[in-house]
Amino acid sequence: MYYLDIAVPVALDQTFTYTSQSHLAPGIRVKVPFGPKKHIGVVMAVTDVAPAKTSFALKSVEEALDEDPIYSEGLLTLARWLSSYYLFPIGEVLRTMLPVSLVKKEKLQFWLTDKGMTARDDETSSYQPILKFLWGRRKVVTELTLKSKLKKWLAETGEKMTLKKLEKVELILRESLDQTHSRSPHWTPDAIAAAQTIPASEPPVLTEGQALVCQAISSMGWGENSERKPFLLHGVTGAGKTEVYLKLIADAIETDPKNQVMVLVPEIALTPQMTRVFSARFPGKVAVVHSAMQPAERWKELSSIRQGERSILIGPRSAVFAAFEQLALLVVDEEHDSSYKQSTGLTYNGRDVAVMRAHLEKRPVVLGSATPSMESYANAKQGRYTLLELLTRANLKPLPEITFISTEVSKGFARKLSGRKTGAPIIDLPVDDKIIEALKANLAEGRQAMVLVNRRGFAYYLFSLRERKAVACPNCSISLTVHEKSTMLRCHYCDFQRPLDRMIPPDAADAYVLVGYGSEQMEMFLKEGLPNARIQRVDSDSVGPRDALPEILDNFRQGHIDILVGTQMLAKGHDFAKVTLICILEIDQTLNLPDFRAGERTFQLMVQAAGRAGRGEWAGRVLVQTQRDDHPVLKAALNQSYAEFWEDQLQFRMAHAYPPLSRMIVFEFNASKREKLLKWMGEVELWIGSKLRDQKAQFSQLTVLGPSVPPLETIRGRSRRTLLLMSKDRAQLWGFARDLLREFQNPKGDLRLRVDVDPQSLL
């Protein structure tokens, strides 16, 4: 008899003991009974020594789902750290780490019997509507998914029926399918397949700076080395950080052909570009994963890495959990990017997990950025990371010249809805004439440009002159964004949407004003002002299907588009040789956000966006429209001086004890009914007051702010309160947070609690 410690995906931060007649290795998934349900758990430890007597009988494992462990010992150790650091149940951590295609639930196929088929076609049968509904969904689903869809359909149609009743009268038949993933193989998207087959390229001769950086990293070897620190590669835009990555990978594989490398990128948008470059250098050795792929596609790519068939894995934050045959190097590109932070469930930061995984496996990790996060740079300044710098561009050309265009709140920021609805041209947006003239001149020279705005959509919001307020989302504490092409008012938080004409009758249009402009309106404005230019909008609304963005970027790269208009998505690590002009509008919107990272985000956005210009044979320039050209952060960006930015923001962070001078944990409490939330907050406040009184010395370095009303009080119909914990003493911070979580982690009814460790935003 064996006794297994098993992590079960439930909201309890512990493992559970089960028995098994056979020895099951740690890392194997098992099906176990848990209360009235069956769960898929993971074996964490095994022993043949019986535990101390319990007041209940131990349950047995029902089935082992794997012959060999899905999780290596290293990944199990990483999971334990994730659970401890991010205050998240170990079973849920392991489920998050698993590829979605292996989150094995019971799959059910519902069939219509011969009797059911007859009733489906019988116009007189009372069962016909529901049988037609089921017939339209004849695919493998979980019972919970089908019941959810059925419940919605029943509510919409007024029909009353259950799956159990249909089974009882022998109209349907259910069949349980025991399989790991149910989708038919549709292996690799066209973009990836094409990238894998492009001709191999010869590596260029490295610059002196690149060679020195590579030597500093590779000289410490690729084997286990507990003395090695993470490397922070601070290189200006265009310095050739990618060539450094490629050279390091080549050295690692040359040292041992079995060596493998993980390359993390912050956005799906960057994946095809990286795939193209890496596949040209290492044909047939690159695997790619991202969230737009089907589960079976991802599993095939991950399996090729797990089995040692390919050497390089490129992917977003979730790729940090991939199993490798022989991991030798980890690379985190654009390490500063907030996209590495997961916002729901396990709120991990892919960059930080990569650093910890490298530490646990004693492997080198390289964090690259032109604008390092303040946390990473602080680690380098304090000697915890090794700082390596590339301060000139690889092509030896100067960085783009940045020019501020000072503006005032002026024309076109607000206009009556009635004027727009009659098709009036957009001739009065608050865009300086110098920007328009620069775009025209750039176009005349046959070169390309990019225009960045702060928001997607047509206008920020619709303002009612009668009620003196913006038209708001009924579910969230936020105004609805106006979308012109779909003629919709839409919430970007809960996706509530209503047709504009339905919410605003035509005869009432004069009583409403459109305020501000988004990427949609800017696209229209530029097309009207530059009728001969080929202009394409790039934002999350326009890219739509999963392959749309790579196609747009390829068309731009090939010269089929003159001007890209879009949001911050455009500033992320793209390399376009013909881009010579960048126009950044509304930078003040980012700078003015009520968040302690606003200055850092503004500097990163400006420098990263500017870095898209002048990467080819022509010099680049950047025009920034602002009302705050004297702000220290904007001045630092103007000079493209990270040192200036660091000194200014460090003083600000020190004055308020913000990270990286301290650590933060945010607790978010929410409920669908505000009165229940307020009652709960009363209990939380009493507990905090008592805790701090009784254990004052133990938590002397802890700052507790709240519970307070966040800037967005309601999201998706749920009222919110936030509690901010902050301390320079990590032990005090996590100790208090664990005690608080233990007290309130399983609230009753509709109450919910979310924990965000190292939050990227306090909004």
Image (cartoon, grey):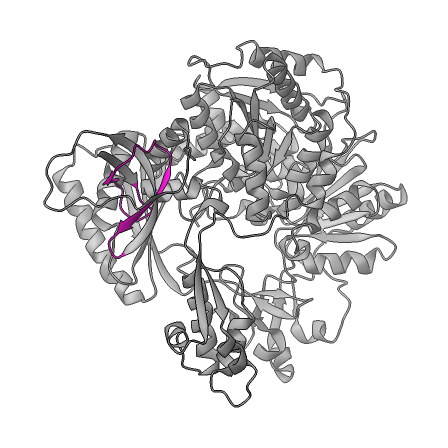
Q: Specify the principal SS of the magenta part.
A: loop
Q: Nearer the viewer, residue 92 or 706?
A: 92
Quarter occupied by the N terminus: top left
- Residue beneath the point at 55% across and 36% down: 302
Q: Measured along the vertical axis of the image, is residue 33 above or below residue 318?
A: below
| Residue 26 forms part of the magenta stretch | yes
Give percent across and percent down for residue 607: 64, 35
Residue 667 seen in the figure: no
| Residue 757 forms part of the magenta stretch | no
Residue 561 seen in the figure: yes
Give percent across and percent down for residue 216: 57, 11
Q: Nearer the viewer, residue 476 or 741?
A: 741
Q: Nearer the viewer, residue 603 or 273?
A: 273
Q: 413 left or right of 727?
A: right
Give percent across and percent down for residue 744: 23, 50
Q: Bounds of the magenta span?
A: 7-36
- Residue beneath the point at 41% across and 52% down: 105
Q: Nearer the viewer, residue 2 or 646?
A: 2
Q: Measured along the vertical axis of the image, is residue 495 above or below residue 546?
A: below
Give percent across and percent down for residue 735: 24, 35
- Residue beneath the point at 63% across and 67% down: 514
